[in-house]
Amino acid sequence: MASLSLGAWRPLIRTVAGQGQVALTVDDAPTPEALPAMLDLLDQHRAKATFFMSGFRALRALDLVAETVRRGHAVYAHGWEHVRLDRCPITRLAQDLERSEELLRRFRPTPRPYLIRLPYNGGYRNARIHRALEAWSPGCQIAHWQLSTEDHVIASKHSTEADARAEIATQVARLANSPNLANALLLMHDQPVNEVPDGGLKAWVTVELMRQLLEMLSARGLASVAVTPRPSVPVWERFILR
C-alpha cells in the first residue's frame, strides 16, 4: 500500500543493510524485572539492540538507562506515557518526545538524525504526524519493523511457564522460517505496556523470548546490530510512502 503526501513523509526504516545482520528493537523499556537479564543475554551473544524507552518507566529506573547505554546499545524516546499520540492534540507529540529525550540525554548525546518509534507506531502513515516529527527533530527517521515477535499477547494467553515457553518457541520458529528474516528489523518489548509488570510470568516471558530469539539468530549466523539511520533517501520518498 502506498500513501501520498505533498513532501511530508519522513524516511521509513524496516531493514538493515549489512550482510548477515538483523536489528533487534525493544519497545517499552526499561523494567527492572526483565531488562538486566536481557542485557546479559545480549552480551553473551555479542549482540546489540535498539531500545525505544518509555519516559515514565525510564524515570523509575535511571540506573538501567545508564547501564543500557554503557553496554553500547542505542537508546531513543518512545514517548512519555504509552498512548496513541496521533490521537492526541498535535502539541502533545513534541512535548512527550522532548520530555523523554531530556531524560535520556543525561546518559548520551541526543542522536542526529533521531530515530523515532511512537507508541503503537501510531501515525506512521499520517502526514500531519510526520510534519510534527520533522518540526521536533529535523532530519528524523521512523524506525518501523519488518517482523514482529507478537510478544504483546503471549503472557496474557498463558498462565504457566511451560505453556508460554511453547508459544515462544512457536513464534521464534515462525520468524526463523520467514523469508524476510535476513536484514529485518525485529520488534519485541520489555514487558509490553499493555501488560502490568509483575516480576513473575510476564517478566519471564520477556527474558525467555530474548533468549530463544538470540539463540535462533546465532544458529543461523545472523548478528543483531543497532539500527542506524539511512544514509541517503530518494527524493520521491518524501511524496510516496510504501
Image (tube, rainbow, N blue to C red):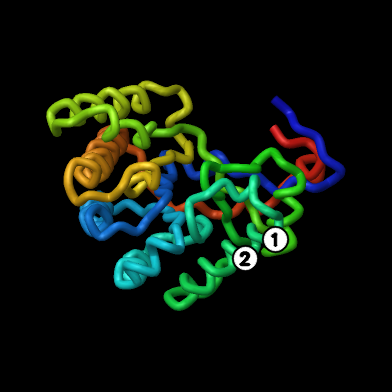
Q: What type is the residue that disc 2 sits on?
A: Gln
Q: Which residue is label 2 attached to?
A: 95
Task: Give the residue at x 26% y 38%.
Answer: 209
Packing grade of label 1 (10 A; few <14, some 14-19, many >=20) is few
What residue appears at the point 12 percent right and 28 percent down from the top-left corner?
Answer: 162
Q: Nearer the viewer, residue 222 or 82?
A: 82
- Residue 70 visible in image: no
Q: Position of residue 86 (x, y in %)?
A: 65, 47
Pointers 2 and 1 in contact (C-beta within 8 Å): yes
Disc 1 designates what residue?
91
Give the side of residue 70 with respect to residue 23, left or right.
Answer: left
Front in this rendered view, residue 17 or 155 = 155
Q: Position of residue 81 (x, y in %)?
A: 48, 56
The crowd level at tag 2 (other Cα within 10 Å; few <14, some 14-19, many 20+) is some
**Residue 150 in sight in this render:** yes
Q: CA distance from mark 2 to mark 1?
A: 6 Å
Q: Secondary structure at mark 2?
A: helix
Q: Which mark is residue 68?
A: none
- Is disc 1 placed on a helix, strand or loop? helix
